[in-house]
Amino acid sequence: MRHFITATLAVVFSLLPAFCQDPATDPAGGGAALANMANVKGVPKGPAPRAANGKPDLSGIWTPDRTFIYDISSALKPGETLPIQPWALKVTKENKSKDDPEANCLPAGVPRMAPYPWKIVQTPTLVVFLFEGNIHTYRQIFLDGRGHPKDPDPTWYGDSTGKWEGDTLVVDTVGFNDKFWFDFAGHPHTEKLHITERYRRPDAGHLDYEVTIDDPGAYTKPFTMYGHSALTNSEIMEYVCNENNQDVSHIVGKDSRK
C-alpha cells in the first residue's frame, strides 16, 4: 500500500504546475513547494536540534525534492540555464526513458533523488544517507579527516568526505562512474564529475542544500542547484525495485515530467 501511495504522489508531482521555479515562492529556484506542501501535514516548528558535539543534528527522514527527480535545470536560480556541452545536450535529447538506469533498477547516483523518503543518520565521524527508493541503498560521508583515494574505483555514489563550516555540512565527492543520469530528463555526466554539497537545517522541520556540479567533460563550467526537504514522521521501508518491475516495458518515448 505504501508504494502505491508513493507512486501516486509521483504522478501528482508530474502534474503540478512549475511553481517550484517561481521566484516569488522560491528565490533559489529549488523545491520549496514540497516543503510548503509538507507544512500542511504538520512539519515540526522551532530551532534545529543539536548533536552532543554542538553541531546541527541533520538526522531524520526527509521528503524528496522534485527538481532533483525530473529535471535538474529546474533547480537552478531563475534565469540560469545548464552550461551543457553540445555533445551532452545531444545525448540528453536522444536518451529514452526506457533506457534510464534508474528505471532499470540501478542506483540513482548523485544528486538525483527517487520520489521516496530518505533518511540521514549522523554521528561525529560519519553521516549516512539511507535511500528507500529503487534498490534501498546508501551513501557514506566520512568526517574523520580522511582524504579521497588517490585512484578511486569509479562507483555510482562516489567517495564522499565531509566537514563542518559553522552550521553547514560540506560534502566533497569524487570517483563517480559515468553510468547514471542526473534526472528523468536524461542529463549525462562523465567520470570527471566532482560534486560539492552544502547541507543546512535552518529549523526543526526543514533541510536546505546546495549542490555544485563540476564536470568539465560534459559541462562548460560549474553550476549550482538548490534543494529543500521537509521532515516527515513516516519511516523508510524496504523497497527492492528488481522485484516485479513492470514499468520499463510500458515506457514509450521521453518522459522528463518537467
Image (spheres, helix red, strand yellow):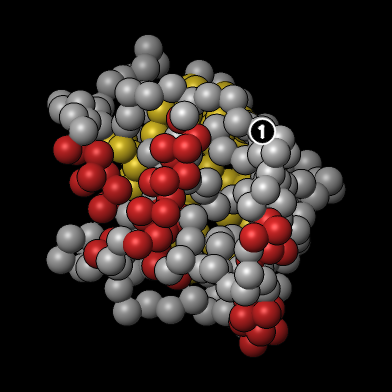
The residue at which mark 1 appears reads as 240
The residue positioned 15% from the left and 26% from the top of the image is 46
Q: In the figure, is residue 42 to the left or right of 241?
A: left
- Residue located 76% across and 46% down the image: 155
* Residue 208 on image: x %, y %: 33, 45
Residue 249 falls in which quadrant of the image? bottom right
Residue 245 or 188: which is nearer the viewer?
245
Q: How many badges with numbers are in the image?
A: 1
Q: Position of residue 107 (x, y in %)?
A: 68, 45
Q: Is residue 187 visible?
A: no
- Asked whether 39 or 216 is in front, the reply is 39
Residue 18 locus on image (x, y percent): 30, 67
Query: For the residue labelled by badge 1, is the local secondary structure a helix, a strand or a loop?
Result: loop
> Residue 188 placed where, x, y %?
66, 68
Q: Is residue 157 left or right of residue 6?
A: right
Q: Amino acid at mark 1?
A: Val
